[in-house]
Image: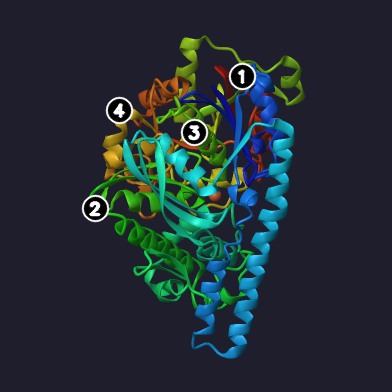
Amino acid sequence: MLILGINYLSESSVCLIKDGNLQYALSEERINRKKNWYGIPYLSINKLLKDCNLKISDIDYFSTHGLSAINKNVPNLNDFEIKKNKIKNSLLNEKKKRNLIKKINERKDHEKKVIHKRTFGILKNLKKKFKKVEIFDHHKSHAASAYFFSNFTKCYALTIDGWGDNASSKLFYCSNGKLEELRRTPTIDSLGYFYGSITKLLGFTPHKHEGKVLGLAAYADFKKAYKEISKLISFNKKILNFEGTTEKGVYLPSFNNPNLNYLLKRFSKAEIAAATQKRLEDVVTDYIKSISKKKIDLALAGGVFSNVKLNQKISELNNINNIYVFPNMGDGGLSVGSAALCMNEKKGIKKFKYKNMYLGPKCSQKISNKKLKIFKMKRIRLSPLKLYTYIGKLLHNNKVIALVDKKMEFGPRALCNRSIICSAKDNKINIDLNEKLKRTEFMPFAPVVLKKDYSKYFYFSEKKHINTFNMTITVKCKKITKKKAPAIVHVDSTARPQIVDQKINSNMYNILKSYKKFSKIPILINTSLNVHEEPIVSNENDALRAFKSSNLDYLFVDGCLYTHDN
Ligand SMILES: [Fe+2]
């Protein structure tokens, strides 16, 4: 059975699941080159069918999410009434109460408009075009992406995001291929909006730059602004759920929240970021502690779990046996979650797998002479045997190499198939490379490390291990890492490594092995290859533009090495 999964929200995407195997997945932004693009991913659907040699009629079912739009049960009026009653019964003055209730009604109208008009319209179009479309709940689709691919027999699945369908978070108990909903957090108590509001307050773009807040957080003491930030959102032990306070208005439909401006007058940006990160960690870990006193396996998905430090904190909890974060944890992963739910429903399949996250289109094998001439590039001709020795030496001599190899990654992380790699020996590379790439980052570049050397440089934990293949978690660095590869160690002594295994990525394995021979270090920097503010490159044309615009030193495309022709 073939199921084609579709996500039409931010980072719209498609996937193909054949029985229990995820065979192909692609985000529309990589094809239309518009970052975080949303809408029906027609280009990716066509690309998937072409790359998999299929026709539309070969697909048994199409799957997607947005169940509440079909059932018209958003907004959840009860959630809004509870919130409004709390305001009415509070000690706030009448003017403040009126203003807050007005904002809550605005939020309610916003949700109604999004679900009843935009989402309903999209689903209607999908049904008209593809006929056999199965629609699932937004958060259940997130949970399914994590549970079905986790390898856990029984587990809990926790989802947290901005909002989707009628919730901003859900908890499921998952067993025997079934997901039982246990808890739901209203859309107006959203942790995604909490973090996004602060992202906006600090001058960054919500939905895009949350990672900058996380990076900045390590530069200040969280205690300074913690009391104020804690007033925004809590874990309510009585209702066992997250609860946004009405006073500061974290529930605003836009991330722009003028009620928070006073924070900038009292605290530095780093202090606000540090307190925000700590509050997120505290409320989420309190929630998880309340799930069970016994040790549990926990599957995680939803945009909030792109926060790698939060994932580290969760993995360190006493009641956690193991965690699994779905590598495309944001809405991009909803194509996969909905397709797995559909396959489970239609064929009773209970376990799903992917070989690795290289699930997208392949790059071309060779750049034509015509293209090389246009981009003023030349090929360096070397035998396969000498190629890796040459690259190892280049990296040891601090050259920066763009890497485009085989199939593209699915998800937010570049896993060395659409990456830039260079030595991590000198901390200065963080400034130089960010300048070249026109990026402002507070977190250092992430490392890529050989599997067999991992535990020499990073503290090994079985709980984090599976997640380190896909860069979904931070880990503590050992002393030797600071000495040998200081450029990848954050000020709080953590890093977000990608483990490289020969079976998963043989070219990167050979490059690292060769670099290690020259430098005695099995670690390189790995960062995404893209033109400034564009999505990660898809094919060799994008790669040539990214390479030239950042003036990198060498370009590796599927086993061939190129450089500037001057
Ligand atoms: Fe979501």
According to the image, label 4 marks what residue? 452
Work out whether mark 2 precedes mark 1 in sequence or the reverse, and give the earlier one: 1
Residue 502 against residue 28 in the figure, above or below: above
Circle 2 residues within 10 Å: few <14, some 14–19, many ≥20:
few
Q: Which mark is residue 345?
A: 3
Q: Secondary structure at mark 2?
A: loop
- Amino acid at the residue labelled 1: Cys
User: Which callout, 4 or 2, points to the residue nearer the camera?
Assistant: 2
Q: Secondary structure at mark 3?
A: helix
Res 265 quadrant in image: bottom right
User: Which callout, 1 or 4, points to the residue nearer the camera?
Assistant: 1
Work out whether mark 4 precedes mark 2 in sequence or the reverse, and give the earlier one: 2
Queried on whether the Cβ of the residue with tag 1 lies below 8 angstroms from ligand 1, the answer reads no
- Amino acid at the residue labelled 2: Asn
- Residue at coordinates 51% horizontally, 38% vertically from top-left? 337
User: Which callout, 3 or 4, points to the residue nearer the camera?
Assistant: 3
Is residue 220 among the parts visible in the rendering? yes
- Residue at coordinates 59% horizontally, 89% vertically from top-left? 94
Res 198 quadrant in image: bottom right
According to the image, label 2 marks what residue? 318
Q: CA distance from mark 4 to mark 2?
A: 28 Å
According to the image, label 1 marks what residue? 52
Q: CA distance from mark 2 to mark 3?
A: 34 Å
Of 300 and 172, the residue lying toward us: 172
